[in-house]
Amino acid sequence: MANYLDHSIEFLKGVGPARAELLKKELGLVTYGDLLTYFPFRYEDRTKFYRINQLQDGMPLVQVAARITGIQLMGQRYKQRLVARATDATGTLELVWFKGIHWVHKQLKPGVDYVIFGKPSRYGRKMTMAHPEIEVATAAHSEARFLQPVYTTTETLKRKYLDSKALVKIMQGLVKAAPAHIEENLPAALRQELNLMPAAEACRQIHFPEDYRQLDLARFRLKFEELFYIQLQLLKLKEGRAARFHGRVFKDTALLTRFYNEHLPFELTGAQKRVIKEIYHDMKSGTQMNRLLQGDVGSGKTIVAFICMLLPIGEGAQATLMAPTEILARQHYQGLKPFAAAMGLKIALLTGSTKTSERKALHTALEAGALHILVGTHALLEETVKFNHLGLAIVDEQHRFGVAQRSKLWRKNKDVYPHVLVMTATPIPRTLAMTLYGDLDISVIDELPAGRKPIKTIHRYDANRLKVNAFLKQEIAKGRQVYIVYPLIEESEKSDLKDLMDGYESVCRAFPEYHVSIVHGKMKPEAKQFEMQRFVQGETQIMVATTVIEVGVDVPNASVMVIENAERFGLAQLHQLRGRVGRGADQSYCVLMSSFKLSADARTRLETMVRTNNGFEIADTDLKLRGPGDLMGTRQSGILDLKIADLGKDGHILQVAREKAREILAADPELQLPENALLKRKLAGLMAGSTMWRNIS
Ligand code: ADP
Ligand code: MG
């Protein structure tokens, strides 16, 4: 066997073939290396003994040394329980068992000293512990003060006696032998500079920490290592691509100048100007652009997209914009059309519902180069859609597309890859962006157009519905329109649909003098389109809908967004929904409706929405609440399967890791220096086995 860490855990003391099979099936643990990186999820504090009179209600798990002074079975049959009294010099503690009481009864001996470990709680005037762990006190107890690791296991494993304790035993054997075989994989200079614990020591301390300080150092070292290697891979990937893929050079800015001088409808914000400069710089550079453009809802991405298209079009190439849904594609098309018309450019829309006859003409014009801009859904990825020369591909809402689809866009050109701009309205916290899109350059529009009134957000309980309705009437009387949105979550689709229909009926009853539209996902596309149009044209004043309106509706006159059962929405979704209003000059409102009963997380979400309109702040809170796994469909991305680092909490470590990776690669791009040999070796191994290349390139 080449490497000690590749040995099968089957050969470890206390494992064997049957348990090895179980551990593989339940936890994916196959090799020594897997087991060593199966880190404890918490530790029990065995570093200190408490006296009974120091115990308080609400303390975490604590350890007490005391003598059992009485044992008693109480209650009848099903309500039977075992109560034992434990006493030290300072007081008495009551221990209670409701399950397995006969077994415990047999073990306990009055007059014997025990080490008792559990969670104290006050019961009337007594201090009690339910189901404590209890062992006869030995000399070893008073000497060994330690943090006891706790490992996650599954119900199946527990039934086969592979609980955390059993894993601790197996781990103890392995961690004794393994450190001698663990190679350091961070250069000495780097470890010195950042005070990073050696790899072998970190392995020992993370499983069986001597004390909290050693645990902290071990954690820091392992988190750093994990994040550092991700960053090193991403930067390598980015660099490799820049070297490999040439981009066509576009530098003729004549069209841009004409648009600026003759057709610019408003002064661009500073942020818009800055990102346009960054994008132009890329397209002039000679290497293929791969850039992520982030901008909150309403930050003005459409005109930025258009201005970017002018550069390739000015040199006879074409541009395309791909959106995830038909509604969104249509809206982009509507948004770009006036600009294109002003500049005398040909633009077309291609979606699944484009008629065959139209398609033919469109294909011909596209291949001949007579069509400058093609907007569409994934329909434009079909083989039959051929560009004359695609200069710039813009992809909106990246996370809704598979990466495979993005790469199909790349291949739309035979000679040279088009420049690629990925646009997203979902603000991504910096830490996450650096990991998810670390291979892309990032531009951010972090400023809203001037003069826009911030949306006022309020939270109201269902009990105050009459007051909310009165407010809505007042706004409608001023000529405004109102959205009322209901959640529709797949698992509970049926009852959600009923909620929506009930809601629709009560809205109709509460607003007899107004017209109400209704739109939901179960409607036929034509019916949906028809209802939307009625609202867009102002024939209806209220739109009752499910989250289908989350993307794609732009009605500047709609200035109130009511979100029903707001506690059921995630923060990102609430923010997107709120972005549907605030598009006109009027004061806009977002009303979050909920019941009184709110979980702590739900309350934080609603409070965050009320406090701020800043998408990045919201995304940060979201990341902290939910962790990155759930965010923005990143669950499938694979690269977020972090073993120890947590992107929600370890942003500062990530920052340092990225900085260091960058410094090292800048000084030694091919990692040829002797001090970087171990980086090179580990990186090669990672890249060979990594899914990262496939996932994000
Ligand atoms: P996004 O797509 O980023 O959500 P849009 O491009 O749809 O935002 O722009 C939102 C609204 O703001 C549009 O009505 C647009 O015309 C307007 N807008 C964009 N940029 C500016 C600007 N610099 N000044 C004033 N209004 C702007
Ligand atoms: Mg937009």
Image (cartoon, grey):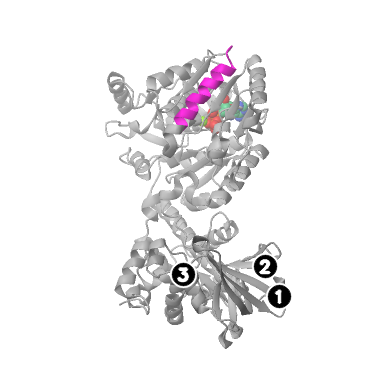
Q: Tell me if residue 276 can be seen.
A: no
The residue at which mark 3 appears reads as 164
**Residue nearer the viewer, 461 or 559:** 461
Q: Going by the picture, which residue comes out furthest to the bottom? A: 139
Q: Is mark 2 within 8 Å of ligand 1?
A: no
- 196 magenta-colored: no
- Find the magenta span and give its range: 496-513
The residue at which mark 2 appears reads as 127
- The kind of residue tagged 1 is Gly
User: From what the image shows, is residue 238 above or below residue 11?
Assistant: above
> Relative to residue 188, is residue 589 drawn left or right?
right
User: Which residue occupies 29% across, 73% down?
Assistant: 17
Q: Are marks 1 and 2 in contact (CB under 8 Å)?
A: yes
- The kind of residue tagged 3 is Ser
Mark toward the viewer: 2 or 3: 2
Q: Going by the picture, which residue comes out furthest to the front? A: 76
Give the image location of residue 488, x and y in percent. 47, 34
- 509 magenta-colored: yes
- The kind of residue tagged 2 is Met
The residue at which mark 1 appears reads as 91
**Residue nearer the viewer, 155 or 539:** 155
Q: CA distance from mark 1 to mark 2?
A: 10 Å
The first of marks 1 and 2 along the sequence is 1
User: Which residue occupies 60% across, 58% down?
Assistant: 652
User: From what the image shows, is residue 129 above or below residue 376?
Assistant: below
**Residue nearer the viewer, 361 or 296:** 296
Q: Main secondary structure of the magenta part?
A: helix
